[in-house]
Amino acid sequence: MNPARVDLHLHSTASDGALAPQAVLDLASERGVELLALTDHDTLAGYTGMASTPPGLRLVPGVEFSTSWRRIGIHVVGLGVDCHAAAMRTACAHQAAARDRRAHAIADYLRRRGVPDAYAGAARLAAGAGIGRPHFAALLVERGVVSEPEQAYKRYLKRAREAHAVDFWAGLGEIVGWIRDAGGSAVLAHPGHYRLTHMRLDELVGEFAALGGTALELVSGRQHPTLTPTLATLARRHGLAVSFGSDFHRVGPGMAGPGIHVELPRGLRAVWEDW
């Protein structure tokens, strides 16, 4: 297929998004998306909360896993995975346990900073989903510790090693292996978010490809347009396909909405060509 508008990276209330899975699909369909993957953090639970796929929208099973590279937290999206594969059950169980350990570590750090019972508060806001840093940020706003989520990240959630807890996640090679064993394509998510030098980003992409990675996100949300040619060059250099995603979490000012217009640079192939 050759879709004109795709989104292979979105989130729902199954992790840290604001909309239920079905609402995400319906909104994406309204905005003309033809190919979509719901990629909640470390879980496939969103796929059990969908009533139907809107006409004209092709849904591809997906998930976004947390991992690390040289002690830097990174994310890998798995696309086209078999949700029932043993590898996916193993991966999601491991990551769910790691996410809970990280949540306890963050709560312990916040307790030492004068914010008690943060785990219980974040769990309440998560409402059954895996607890993530956005839930702690929302809790800090709710309690009046900070006035907006961004302050929570700057003052609390980015400064402590406990808030990153890269040691809890499965390794990059293990994540890629699980995705491949489940019949999926491993995609390096939002490469521009990691604030790496060009040399270090090249090393990351090279190692990701060597481990069996399939693609990198050429466009992620509202990234600066000057980054796209750089990522295209890296994809060509390391023989990777490319993917497109909004990293949608919620509707709001300054937030990327569902749907990316596909403009495939010369000499590159789209990740969905393998499906």
Image: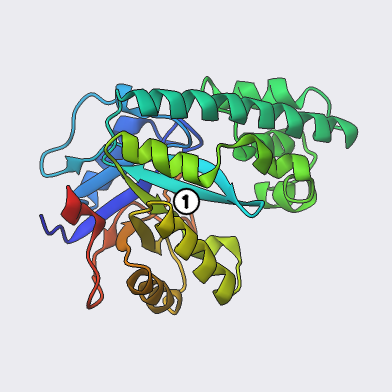
Pick the residue in front: 5 or 244. Answer: 244
| Image coords of residue 136 (percent x, y) | 68, 35
The residue pinned by badge 1 equals: 252
| Image coords of residue 45 (percent x, y) | 39, 25
Look at the image and tell me in which quarter the N terminus lies.
bottom left
Q: Is residue 128 above or below residue 115?
A: above
Judging from the image, the colouring scheme is rainbow
Left/right placement of residue 228 relative to residue 32 reads: right
- The part of the image, by quadrant, that contains residue 243 is bottom left
Left/right placement of residue 23 relative to residue 231 reads: left
| Image coords of residue 76 (percent x, y) | 45, 48
- The part of the image, by quadrant, that contains residue 86 is top left
| Image coords of residue 180 (percent x, y) | 33, 41
Q: Residue at x 60, y 30 (%)?
A: 99
Q: Is residue 58 above or below residue 232?
A: above
Q: Is residue 248 above or below residue 218?
A: above
Q: Is residue 163 visible?
A: yes
Left/right placement of residue 135 relative to residue 128 reads: right
Q: Residue at x 31, y 25 (%)?
A: 85
Badge 1: residue crowd in 10 Å (few <14, some 14–19, many ≥20): few
Pick the residue in front: 264 or 94. Answer: 94
